[in-house]
Amino acid sequence: MSSSIGIFGLAAAAGYFIVPLFLSKEDLEHYLSRTTNSEAEWRDYLLRPVTDFLDEHLHFISPNFISLIGFALVAFIAYLFSIKADYLVIFAVTIVTGFTDMLDGSLARNAKRVTKTGVILDVTRDFALVIVLSYYLILYQFLSDDLFFWFLVGYIFLGVIRNLEFKFASGKFSLEEDYKFILDRLRLFIYIVGILALILTPLSENFRTLGETFIISSIVMTWISVLFHSAHLKILRDERLGV
């Protein structure tokens, strides 16, 4: 397991010391921040009929309220696992929970109701969903604890580096400084897709293979994200310190 720490440490070191020698701040910020614009715009466009209806007719349903529904659904998933509910029910509830993750962000952007609290709720809910699903799938022996540990180490590395990026930018909440690489979004989505496949393992062992493939892909995406975010952190730090 210590090898995962070493591999992600290598990504952080290579990104911090080597990548900035070849890429400028403008190049990195283009890849980190703007490469996600088209993905977010398409998602917001597809969900606009729903978000417009909520904003116009059910204004009391805020993005944060949807995030809290997501927390409740995560708790419900834990309950379903604990009572050994049918795996198809767990699969369906997990999909609904994932939909709330897409909906709260799109509602916040489409209705111009983005808040720092909302961002914190969104990130915390995502982490809670990953932990609950992974814990029970490891318990059911559908998910390898080694695979989960690799994913978790990458998740922690990336979280720490992105917080440091924020610190060396203005330090104030701003969507312009919420630096994201398109793989930052995809890695979590792909991991959840892998989890969904693993939930269906009782149907066929092929779902286990499919799920593990998605999770390994997510780990690789996280490694690449750590590499580029570390490079961007170095550039922001040098700029802030006048190096």
Image (tube, helix red, strand yellow):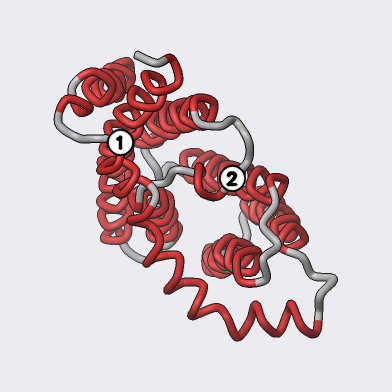
Note whether residue 39 is visible. Answer: yes
Q: Is residue 214 left or right of residue 104?
A: left
Residue lying at the far front in this picture: please name it.
Answer: 242
Q: Is residue 71 above or below residue 145?
A: below
| Residue 9, x across and y down, in percent | 30, 19
Neighbour tally class for label 1: few under 14, some 14-19, many 20 plus, Cα within 10 Å? some
The residue that disc 2 covers is 174
| Residue 169, x across and y down, in percent | 50, 31
Q: Is residue 167 above or below residue 99?
A: above
User: Residue at point 64% right, 55% down?
Assistant: 77
Q: Are marks 2 and 1 in contact (CB under 8 Å)?
A: no
Residue type at the position of mark 1: Lys
User: Residue at point 59% right, 30% down?
Assistant: 171
Q: Nearer the viewer, residue 241 or 60?
A: 241
The quadrant in which the C terminus is found is: top left
Residue 40 is labelled as: none
Residue type at the position of mark 2: Ser
Q: Is residue 215 left or right of residue 169?
A: left
| Residue 218, x across and y down, in percent | 32, 46
The residue that disc 1 covers is 25
User: Residue at point 50% right, 48% down?
Assistant: 176
Which type of secondary structure does the marked residue at label 1 adopt? helix
Sequence-first tag of 2 and 1: 1
